[in-house]
Image: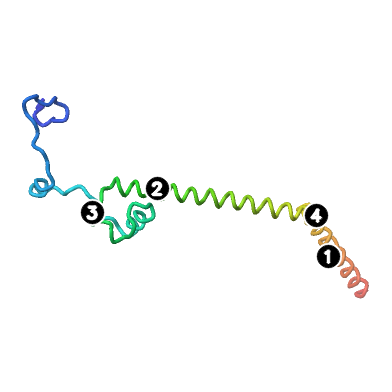
Amino acid sequence: MNTGNRRLCSKPQEGASAPQQTPERAERLGFKVPGYRPSDWDRKMLVWSGRFKTPEQIPEFVSFEMIDAARNRVRVKACYVMMALTIGACLVMVITGKQAAGRHDNLTSRNMEKKARWREEAQREKDEAAALAEKAQ
């Protein structure tokens, strides 16, 4: 088995050191410098997260870690906003529920009124049908 190409599995030799990769050297060798060109949405995230004050301050290339941290910070802020909105909606529901209870307005009374109306309409239709039957005779 040829182990010459298996550099990751072999132990490094003590005397040999790997040449240092600088951005200039990487460019000459044809490698791309690590970086990420942020989209417009990423630029908004970077500003919303507080990393930069204005979109003009954002460099052309930023690290993916910076974008990821900005996204996480915006995600956490959105969660806080949703929690606050949920708590606010719960408080509104409690207040309106107490007001409805003060007016004696509840689902049971509404349901009973609706069923009483249906009974009246059914009785009225029955009486009209009986009246038409008597006229026909």
Provide the residue designation for mark 4. 104
Viewer-nearest residue: 124 or 52: 52
Q: Quadrant of the C terminus?
A: bottom right
Q: CA distance from mark 2 to mark 3?
A: 20 Å
Q: Marks 4/2: CA distance? A: 46 Å
- Tell me which numbered mark, 3 or 1, is placed earlier along the sequence: 3
**Is disc 1 placed on a helix, strand or loop?**
helix
Packing grade of label 1 (10 A; few <14, some 14-19, many >=20) is few
Q: Position of residue 46 (x, y in %)?
A: 34, 54
Q: Which residue, as the protein is rendered here, is positioned at the far bottom?
A: 135
Q: Nearer the viewer, mark 2 or mark 1?
A: 2
- N-terminal of the pair, mark 2 or mark 3, is 3
Q: Which mark is residue 121?
A: 1
Residue under label 2, please give it: 73
- Give, as a three-letter code, the residue at label 1: Glu
Where is residue 94 drawn, in percent x and y? Answer: 68, 50
Q: Residues within 10 Å of mark 3 (few under 14, many from 20)?
A: few
